[in-house]
Image: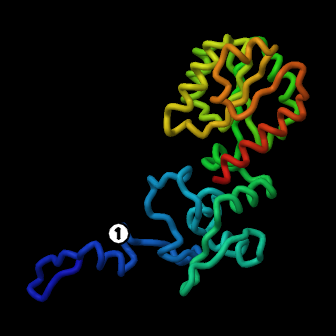
């Protein structure tokens, strides 16, 4: 502890502590990072971020910030520099693409990187028909057989798209769709209805759905529409 001229201990302010390279403001320049680039807020929410610093990427990849800087400077990791400084920034989409291309774990970014599709399908037939149409590196599919299972997965899985086979029951299908549309957090979820016949179309409010498919449907076309609508939703 520093002492003043009288020999008494002298308190050092947090700001001064940071300038001396100690305390909460400390960062490690030996690893190639700058104060702005090394994350000091351990509780930051990765899922809410759209742009990352080299320090944050270093933590995600478990490497030194200097290594991330080399990836950036070589053009392998695409991003931009903050005007008037040397600090680097990498958009989330570029980071996810880089991790996938190099076979690196996505960690906390996995939920953002994967398109998530929930299929409400009592018989399991819809899931079996379209699951092979999706690249498992980019999409996760889950299924529910009842309205209750659907409610549970909506809270834990947070799907981008819900495909509802009206075999679950027109009333249940409409309740699921209306419930999603009425809540701000899920109002933009893509909804697709699978119908058996024209009579079913009269038993549910189809204006709640983005698309409807009637059996027999083309599984490849259904999957393509799901991908297209999910990508459009995520790009907003």
Residue 58 vs 10, above or below: the answer is above
Residue receiving disc 1: 23
Check the picture and name the quadrant holding the N terminus.
bottom left
Asked whether, in this view, residue 32 is left or right of residue 184, the answer is: right
Q: Residue at x 67, y 53 (%)?
A: 235
Locate residue 61, reporting x and y percent: 66, 58
Q: Residue at x 87, y 24 (%)?
A: 129
Q: Residue at x 64, y 43 (%)?
A: 111
**Quadrant of res 57:** bottom right
Per the image, label 1 sits on a secondary structure element best described as helix
**Quadrant of res 163:** top right
Residue 145 vs 158, above or below: the answer is above
**Quadrant of res 26:** bottom left
Asked whether, in this view, residue 170 is left or right of residue 48, the answer is: right
Q: Estimate how packed mark 1 is, as few (under 14), some (14 to 19) or many (20 or more) residues with alpha carbons within 10 Å.
A: few
Locate residue 122, reporting x and y percent: 73, 12
Residue 35 vs 139, above or below: the answer is below
Locate residue 150, reporting x and y percent: 61, 21
The coloring applied to the image is rainbow
Locate residue 137, reporting x and y percent: 79, 43
Q: Residue furthest left?
A: 6
Q: Residue at x 52, y 77 (%)?
A: 34
């Amino acid at each position: 502890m520093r002492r003043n001229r009288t020999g008494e201990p002298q308190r050092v302010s947090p700001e001064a502590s940071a300038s001396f390279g100690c305390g909460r403001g400390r960062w490690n320049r030996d690893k190639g990072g700058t104060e702005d680039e090394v994350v000091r807020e351990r509780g930051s929410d990765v899922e809410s971020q759209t742009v990352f610093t080299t320090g944050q990427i270093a933590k995600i990849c478990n490497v030194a910030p200097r290594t991330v800087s080399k990836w950036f400077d070589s053009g392998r990791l695409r991003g931009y520099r903050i005007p008037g400084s040397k600090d680097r920034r990498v958009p989330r989409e570029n980071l996810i693409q880089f991790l996938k291309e190099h076979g690196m774990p996505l960690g906390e970014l996995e939920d953002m990187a994967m398109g998530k599709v929930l299929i409400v399908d009592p018989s399991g037939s819809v899931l079996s028909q379209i699951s092979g149409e999706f690249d498992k590196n980019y999409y996760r599919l889950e299924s529910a057989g009842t309205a209750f299972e659907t409610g549970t997965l909506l809270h834990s899985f947070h799907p981008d798209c819900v495909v509802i086979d009206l075999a679950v029951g027109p009333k249940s299908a409409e309740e699921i769709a209306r419930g999603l549309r009425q809540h701000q957090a899920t109002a933009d979820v893509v909804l697709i209805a699978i119908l058996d016949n024209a009579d079913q179309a009269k038993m549910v409010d189809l204006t709640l759905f983005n698309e409807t498919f009637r059996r027999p449907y083309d599984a490849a076309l259904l999957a393509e529409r799901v991908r297209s609508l999910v990508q459009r939703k995520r790009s907003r």
